[in-house]
Amino acid sequence: MFAAQSRRRFQKNTVALMVSFILLQPAVAAESSKDTAKKTTPSKGDTSFVIGEHIEVTGKRLTDASRVLTSVDRLGADVAQNSNADFAWRLIGQLPGVMTTEFNQGSSSGKLSFRGFNGEGEVNAVKLLIDGIPSNSNDGNMPYLDMIFPLEIEAAEVVRGTTDPRFGLYNIAGHVNFITRSGGTYLDSRLSVGSFGKAQAQFAAGLEQDGFRQNYALNYRKADGYRDHSEATRLGFSGKWGWDMTEQLTLHASARTYSAEQQEPGYLTADVAAATPRATNAYNASDLDERDMDQFSLGLDAHLSELASVKTLVWLNTLDDDRFVKFSAGTSQQNRVTQEQHYGASSTLGVAPEVDGFEHVQLELGASIEKQDNESRRYLTKERVITSQTRDQQYDLSVAGVYAQLSMEPVSWLRITPSWRLDKVDGDFQDFRAKTSADINDYGTISQPKLALAILASEDVTLFSNWGRSFQIGAGSGAYLIPPRQVDLAPSVNDGWELGVKYQTSARTQLRTTLWQQTATGEFKRKLNDPLGDFDNLGATRRKGVDVQFSIAPTQALNLWAAIAWQQAQIETPDPATPALAGNDIDHIPQWIHSAGVDYSLSDQWLLSASLRAQSSYELTTSNDRGRYGKYLLLDAQARYIINTQLEVSLQLQNLTDDAYEYVWWDGSQTLHSPGEGRAVTAAVHLRY
């Protein structure tokens, strides 16, 4: 059960949202949410790859990510809403070239990464957005993603590379945006039960009437867990509102609240993991994480004319995390307390003037500010009783940015998109234990020029290339000029380029292949178990790869898709203190990532599908002398039976071949293992009204 404090907090926030929920009237029609996800054929020059339903992009006076001319991947509502995924980040593992790192440790369940960056939490290179709201924690991780459940997802979009100027902080290798349902009139529910004591109830509702839109989602999930001491309970509730005040002005708002209590099974030694993968350690018996999160936003969209529009958004995120964890028998249990408030605002102006001699011209100007108030405290504990304190820090961070992007087509077959982004960082740091304070490193104005070109060879073929720059700054205490450091650190500058071709004859056939590279100067990585929260200098790095994706629907009943990604991440010029690392692979990055799927309509009522995820092994450490781990091949299969327009039942088998896979890390003296789930079955009932 939830701790009393967490339960009261969740109830208080939920009541406020439920007041709006009662505005839903019995007049809600039996309209499927699928009606709100229109299927369209992407326009000329679209570089995106889609799995599931094609997604209509709105707000075309502003940047459409598929026109940024980089690798864009989208997951449709049909795939997301029929999924039994425990966490939303698992859904993204189906998209091309995306790696998922599965810790399977309570709230530290796992994360996604791509473009040769690992998911260890040392270098968090992916910016997370939820309905366009920046949603990373200070260290770049993605705890807010746990607030999103499958039934409320309308689409998920991954933009890879360094050429999109809209975002600065954390946007090192790209970003991912989870888009939840907006508009429509529906009542939707999904109930599921499965192996390892899993049970989930998801409810979604929408009412659209007279220019006023309401969308709600209520979610509950519990599980006993594959391993011992893995019980988890998660609750989430959200509301979204949109009001067309006039034909030109739309006001919209959103609110989310989430609470979770999850036990942690801990990491096993190699011999125990091999013999009893479902076991836990006796010393992990009191490991537990309680996490509360909220997210609020308010926005205004204005269509100034047929050729211009403005979007403005303000937001607030709060994170309250209280974790007890013990990593191995020879270490102490830790209590890690994190309290963060992130808030900010962004505004974007898009103009599409008619210019003589040009087929198309579009100018976009944007500005944003992201501010953080963070507290991080750590204690040594014994059975959740504090024995001493090892960290007591408070730090503020502010990142302000502006950008300009010009997309122009001087002739019908050529698109040129230059852009430029500038970011400025500010903040201060206090260490209450050491009674010291420090200013932010003087990173200066961080300049990020970008350029994308495309040859629109035909309606079916787009040849595209891009180059761009992104940046990395320190996380936690690593962003500040803390003694004995006396010289301000420069940001780590990432330069990336990409060459690609997209071939699409219709919505039924698409192929994209890309060659890419990304280099970084002075890359640094967090010391994950360091009391100060400092960093190590990894040095200059180079990442490169090849991505190939295709999908084909040879008949109305059959759809096939597959993706293959090869990548390599190496240390080019290491820190002078570690010269032996030159040329070594960066840890926890597999060279091969595969995904594939097939969907087959056996009849109007029977729908069958299967999907595969696989990766090769990775080096355990940057020294490349501790062995290779992490290889797996996971196969899932699902059968859905549509009884009528309101009722559907499904059965899914996960890890069909019962492949033994695990996450492994090196603690300085031994390998520590977290086995993944074995074969599992989930039954679900989906009701629509």
Image: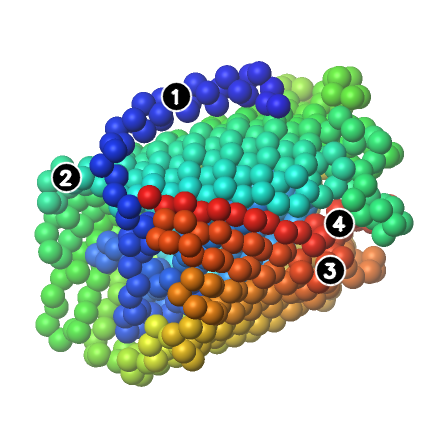
Mark 1, residue position: 15
Residue 20 versus residue 558: which sits nearer the camera? 558
Q: Nearer the viewer, mark 4 or mark 3?
A: 3
In the rendered image, which quarter contains the C terminus? top left
Q: Residue at x 81, y 41 (%)?
A: 279
Q: Nearer the viewer, mark 4 or mark 1?
A: 1
Counting residues from the N terminus, which is met first, the one under dot 4 or under dot 2?
2
Coordinates of residue 327 in the picture (x, y in percent): 78, 37
Q: Mark 4 near mark 3, Cβ–Cβ under 8 Å?
A: no
Find numbered disc 3 in the image and state the secondary structure of the residue it sits on: loop
Find numbered disc 2 in the image and state the secondary structure of the residue it sits on: loop
State the separation of the CA atoms marked 3 and 2.
53 Å
* Residue 120 tag number: none
Can residue 522 be seen here? The reply is no
Query: In the picture shown, does residue 678 fall above or below 235?
Result: below
State the separation of the CA atoms marked 2 and 1.
26 Å
Badge 4 local density, few (<14 within 10 Å), some, or many (20+)?
Answer: many
Badge 3 local density, few (<14 within 10 Å), some, or many (20+)?
Answer: some
Q: Mark 1 near mark 3, Cβ–Cβ under 8 Å?
A: no
Coordinates of residue 393 in the picture (x, y in percent): 60, 25
Mark 2, residue position: 210
Give the left or right position of residue 332, taking residue 532 as reference: right
Mark 3, residue position: 659
Identified by mark 2, the residue type is Asp
